[in-house]
């Protein structure tokens, strides 16, 4: 029953997102296309973080590193004339996944706050490396000469096409994510979060499962980074800074972690609030800050938990 | 090799470490005893610096401004704990992260509204200016030497309080088994508030001492917060001894790295490569150090045991 | 509890549905700067200067009722680009202006010019936009980043100074400053030290510096890094021993924070509050009267930006669709700039003078920057030859 309601809620949200371009066209505000596209891209990043954070209990403060790697994986080939998305995007996912494998292999030896800090450390290291590498712009960043080419009628230069491509990727991610969570892999991950020693006692090699989840999250993060590079047509190493990881984490927690729709809601709420509040007043952080505190104090399941019937914790 | 230079750099590293220790001690206390991730610790550091500047303007006396700033930060810390954070102890670390992140945004803006966004003027008091001759031909700024002394004094004070007084005993007991301590009739809520306030005061002390040599502006706590987190992780969460050792090690590695890494590199690789790799590696040195420590000791150097 | 939740949701929905306000004003200018966070002070200087310019023009730029829409880029390039998109598509501005940071500019400028809209940059001067990426629709009222250190290099070269110890933060701008300096300074550079971006404590580097015993120190430390470095340099007793020359380090923002530690330092700049011309006297005088503090070059550039736009709109008699006309008018730089008259180079960057400044105790006892001499007259940047535009 809860599953049906969840699926319906998710479908409703996706339908609403699909309708945005039409609404934007009706009120003649094409900007909303760009705004919601950016929201969806961060939603993809937030969902990828939720896989390990919400479901797996691994609080990674270095997730922005994978977005950065994914972004560079698009810009650097573009610099050398390779514009095909079919090359760039799988490359982004592969490189981020590999980085996640390396970082995870070392970091997952720790837990709790130590894990948080070591993931942060790795992200910062990548950030400082990024600033120093001059051929790739250092912190002046790199311009994307051209958006990734999908071939045929799918021209990402057209804002509508780009929007629906991102929406499609988000929808696929949510669908696949739901399957994975309900499948054996997902169940193991959630069980590990709940009681790792017990899982080990039963005979699961928990490190392997956690690492697999970590790599998966990293790879999807890389895809989000590739899309972000296309969205901004520009990237800098600051995409990898720990404060960006913090932003994504806030989106996940705000929206409701341990759910699939939560991060999407969180990304939307955070970015919309930021956009609207900063237009009202220079002191918008004095409003956003206490708002976050209020959400933590009174809305335990995040925003997703606020919605009627959406508070079921296991996703 | 100019040995006097090395000695001076070691002093610099020690001083940086001691500064980090003041922040780390408060943070690790709160973490270890209340199991609470307080990202807003950097904001309390910032408030300490701002209060000191404000009280100096008001009273004209450096000594008075120090005492008043410490008191003010202590009060603010306790207020924050009672109003916003008290209910969060039982909750997930992530809720702590989100809530204290919100507090960071709030305090940064509050300070900007109250004092403006421009950096405030804060300088070393004339009484503490000048140099002291530590070794022949080695003149060290008095103010920085004072920081080292203050930091070591605080470390000693903390050691005495935690291991020799009743309060310290309560703190250690509360960290071990909160429920039992409450059952024995101790007002655990008051204890936590006091500990949090004490940690805030330590952060404020760090801030007011840093003000004259660093900048006093909104957001000044964030940069140092990261370094402090690295320190307590290396040292071991909940351990004051770990915080001291971790802080000094981080201070030393960072300082000596910045001073000697590039010239050392230049002896093995080309000067051009050393030129670009040196600074980059020096910026990352404390992170590399932390990763290395965690690889061999995933709980830090002196993990405090918890039940 | 439920009411708090409901209220939050309602507030969100209401905020979303609120569209742009009042579509009656004919001229809309979008101004992107950093208004929050530690660097927000710079944004404040720029915003206040824009407001003063509007006051001086009677709130009518080029004779048209004007609305300026400010955007806070939070120092993030992707937020800057989103703001540019919002200004172009939602608010439908006619000109975009502002932008402090080079990396934000590199994201924003192509977006704006790509949409066929005029952009008047008022601070960032990345070399890409002065060279290969120069664009007919992109103008700047500031400078190209390298010009300021080039002036310092020329001054020190002319003075025959040698044994220079150079320090800067380890990022693109830092490296550019030192290379710009070395373009004109051919003497001996004892060391080039790059420090961590955002570093607070320079004691280690200062100790090394003292051990190296240079004759002159040249640094680039913007913002809070500058305040920290200046304080610590003075506290180490080096201010009296080794003269400190810098770019973008000692200015009207950092001086109040460091006090005497900034006394006697040299900088090079294209402008100073004491530069003598009619427009500048009016700008600085009225600014101090209205806002109560001394303006910086960030402000002077932003003021000039509005004046430049004003001259262009006047030239096309308010016909904002005549972009070619506005571009032609802007190229003439026919307005009263706070730096005095200047001309535009082919890459739409100013050809202007650069002066040596020194921080001294002014008539009222306050520390202020004063012009000592002219270092460059009508100085062109080093990248204009890469710009394919010819006019």
Image (cartoon, grey):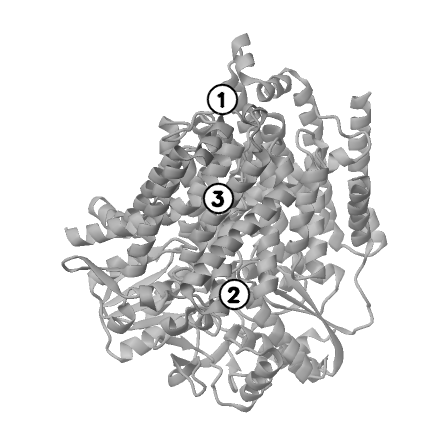
Badge 2 vs badge 1, beta-carbon distance below 8 Å = no
Discs 1, 3 touching: Cβ within 8 Å = no
> Which chain letter goes with mark 1?
B
Residue C300 percent across, percent down from the top left: 55, 78
Q: Evaluate whether label 1 is on the same chain as label 3.
A: yes
Quarter of the figure that contains the N terminus of chain C: top right
Q: Are marks 2 and 3 in contact (CB under 8 Å)?
A: no
In the shown orientation, is residue B39 left or right of residue B102? left
Q: Around disc 3, counting alpha carbons within 10 Å, would you say few (fewer than 14), some (14 to 19), or many (20 or more)?
A: many
Which residue occupies 52% across, 50% down?
B74
Mark-to-mark CA distance, 2 and 3: 50 Å
Image quadrant assignment for residue B231: top left
Looking at the picture, tell me which residue is in the foreground, A294 or C239.
Answer: A294
Residue B199: mark: 3
Task: Give whichever of C301, B293 is nearer the camera.
Answer: B293
Residue A224 in the figure: left or right of residue A279: left
For residue B307, the mark is 1
Pointer 2: what residue?
Answer: C129
| Chain of the residue displaying label 2 | C
Taking C158 as reference, is A35 above or below it?
A: above
The mark lying in front, picked from 2 and 3, is 3
Residue C317 bears which disc, if any?
A: none
SS class of the residue under badge 2? helix
Q: What element carries label 3?
A: helix
Distance from label 2 to label 1 (Cα)? 61 Å
- Tell me, yes or no, if residue A28 can be seen here: yes
Chain ID of residue with mark 3: B
């Amino acid at each position: 029953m809860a599953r049906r309601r969840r699926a319906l809620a998710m479908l409703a949200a996706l339908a609403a997102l699909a309708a945005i371009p039409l609404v934007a066209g009706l009120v003649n505000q094409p900007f909303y296309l760009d705004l919601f596209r950016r929201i969806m891209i961060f939603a993809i990043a937030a969902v990828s973080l939720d896989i390990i954070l919400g479901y797996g209990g691994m609080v990674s403060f270095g997730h922005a590193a994978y977005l950065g790697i994914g972004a560079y994986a698009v810009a650097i080939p573009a610099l050398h004339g390779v514009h095909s998305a079919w090359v760039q995007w799988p490359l982004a996912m592969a490189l981020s996944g590999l980085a996640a494998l390396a970082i995870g292999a070392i970091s997952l030896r720790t837990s709790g706050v130590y894990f948080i800090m070591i993931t942060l450390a790795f992200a910062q290291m990548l950030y400082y490396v990024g600033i120093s590498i001059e051929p790739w712009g250092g912190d002046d960043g790199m311009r994307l000469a051209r958006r990734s080419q999908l071939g045929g009628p799918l021209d990402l230069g057209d804002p509508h096409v780009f929007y629906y491509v991102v929406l499609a990727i988000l929808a696929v991610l949510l669908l696949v994510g739901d399957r994975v969570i309900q499948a054996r892999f997902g169940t193991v991950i959630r069980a590990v979060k709940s009681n790792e020693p017990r899982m080990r006692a039963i005979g699961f090699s928990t490190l392997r499962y956690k690492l697999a989840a970590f790599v998966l999250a990293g790879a999807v993060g890389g895809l989000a980074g590739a899309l972000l590079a296309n969205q901004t047509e520009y990237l800098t190493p600051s995409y990898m800074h720990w404060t960006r990881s913090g932003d994504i984490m806030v989106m996940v927690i705000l929206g409701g972690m341990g759910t699939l729709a939560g991060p999407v809601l969180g990304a939307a709420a955070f970015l919309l609030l930021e956009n609207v509040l900063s237009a009202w007043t220079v002191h918008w952080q004095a409003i956003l800050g206490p708002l976050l505190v209020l959400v933590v104090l009174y809305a335990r399941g995040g925003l997703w938990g606020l919605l009627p019937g959406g508070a079921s914790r296991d996703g | 090799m100019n040995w006097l230079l090395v000695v001076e750099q070691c002093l610099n590293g020690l001083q940086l470490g001691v500064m980090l220790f003041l922040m780390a001690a408060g943070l690790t206390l709160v973490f270890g005893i209340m199991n609470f991730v307080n990202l807003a610790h950097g904001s309390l550091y910032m408030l300490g610096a701002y209060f000191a500047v404000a009280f100096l303007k008001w009273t004209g006396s450096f000594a008075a401004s120090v005492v008043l700033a410490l008191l003010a930060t202590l009060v603010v810390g306790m207020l924050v704990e009672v109003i916003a954070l008290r209910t969060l102890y039982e909750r997930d670390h992530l809720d702590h992260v989100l809530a204290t992140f919100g507090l960071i945004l709030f305090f940064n803006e509050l300070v900007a509204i109250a004092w403006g966004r421009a950096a405030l003027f804060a300088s070393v008091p004339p009484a503490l200016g000048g140099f002291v001759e530590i070794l022949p031909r080695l003149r060290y700024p008095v103010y920085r030497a004072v920081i080292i002394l203050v930091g070591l004094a605080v470390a000693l004070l903390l050691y005495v309080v935690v291991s020799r007084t009743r309060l310290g005993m309560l703190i250690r007991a509360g960290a071990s088994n909160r429920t039992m301590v409450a059952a024995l009739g101790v007002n655990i809520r008051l204890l936590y508030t006091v500990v949090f306030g004490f940690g805030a005061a330590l952060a404020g002390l760090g801030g007011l001492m840093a003000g004259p040599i660093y900048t006093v502006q909104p957001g000044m706590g964030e940069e140092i917060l990261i370094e402090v987190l690295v320190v307590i992780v290396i040292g071991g969460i909940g351990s004051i001894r770990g915080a001291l050792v971790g802080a000094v090690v981080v201070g030393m590695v960072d300082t000596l790295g910045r001073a000697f890494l590039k010239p050392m590199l230049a002896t093995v690789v080309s000067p051009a490569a050393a030129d670009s790799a040196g600074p980059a590696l020096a910026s990352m040195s404390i992170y590399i150090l932390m990763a290395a420590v965690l690889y061999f000791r995933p709980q830090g150097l002196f993990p405090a045991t918890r039940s | 509890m439920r009411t708090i939740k409901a209220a939050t949701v309602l507030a969100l929905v209401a905020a979303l549905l609120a569209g742009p306000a009042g579509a009656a004003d004919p001229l809309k200018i979008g101004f992107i700067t950093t208004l929050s966070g530690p660097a927000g002070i710079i944004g404040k200087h720029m915003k206040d200067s824009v407001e003063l310019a509007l006051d001086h023009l009677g709130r009518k730029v080029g004779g048209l009722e004007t609305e300026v829409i400010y955007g806070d880029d939070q120092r993030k390039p992707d937020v800057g680009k989103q703001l540019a998109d919002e200004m172009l598509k939602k608010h439908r501005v006619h000109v975009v202006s502002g932008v402090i940071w080079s990396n934000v500019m590199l994201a924003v400028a192509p977006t704006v010019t790509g949409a066929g809209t005029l952009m008047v940059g008022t601070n960032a001067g990345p070399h890409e936009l002065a060279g290969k990426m120069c664009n007919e629709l992109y103008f700047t009222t500031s400078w190209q980043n390298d010009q300021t250190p080039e002036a310092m290099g020329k001054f020190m070269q002319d003075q025959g100074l040698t044994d220079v110890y150079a320090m800067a933060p380890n990022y693109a701008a830092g490296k550019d400053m030192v290379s710009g300096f070395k373009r004109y300074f051919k003497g001996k550079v004892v060391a080039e030290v790059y420090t961590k971006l955002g570093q607070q404590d320079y004691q280690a580097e200062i100790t090394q510096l003292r051990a190296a015993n240079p004759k002159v120190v040249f640094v680039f430390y913007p913002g809070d890094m500058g305040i920290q470095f200046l304080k610590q340099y003075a506290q180490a007793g080096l201010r009296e021993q080794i003269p400190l020359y810098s770019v973008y380090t000692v200015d009207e923002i950092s001086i109040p924070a460091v006090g005497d530690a900034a006394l006697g330092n040299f900088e090079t700049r294209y402008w100073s509050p004491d530069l003598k011309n009619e427009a500048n006297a009016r700008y600085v005088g009225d600014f101090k009267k209205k806002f109560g503090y001394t303006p910086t070059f960030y402000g002077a550039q932003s003021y000039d930006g509005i004046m430049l736009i004003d001259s262009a709109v006047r030239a096309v008699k308010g016909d904002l669709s005549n972009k070619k006309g506005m571009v032609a008018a802007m190229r003439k730089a026919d307005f009263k700039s706070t730096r005095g008259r200047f001309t535009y180079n082919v890459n739409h960057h100013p050809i202007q003078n650069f002066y040596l400044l020194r921080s001294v105790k002014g008539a009222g006892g306050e520390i202020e920057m004063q012009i000592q001499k002219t270092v460059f007259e009508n100085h062109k940047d080093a990248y204009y030859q890469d710009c394919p535009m010819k006019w």
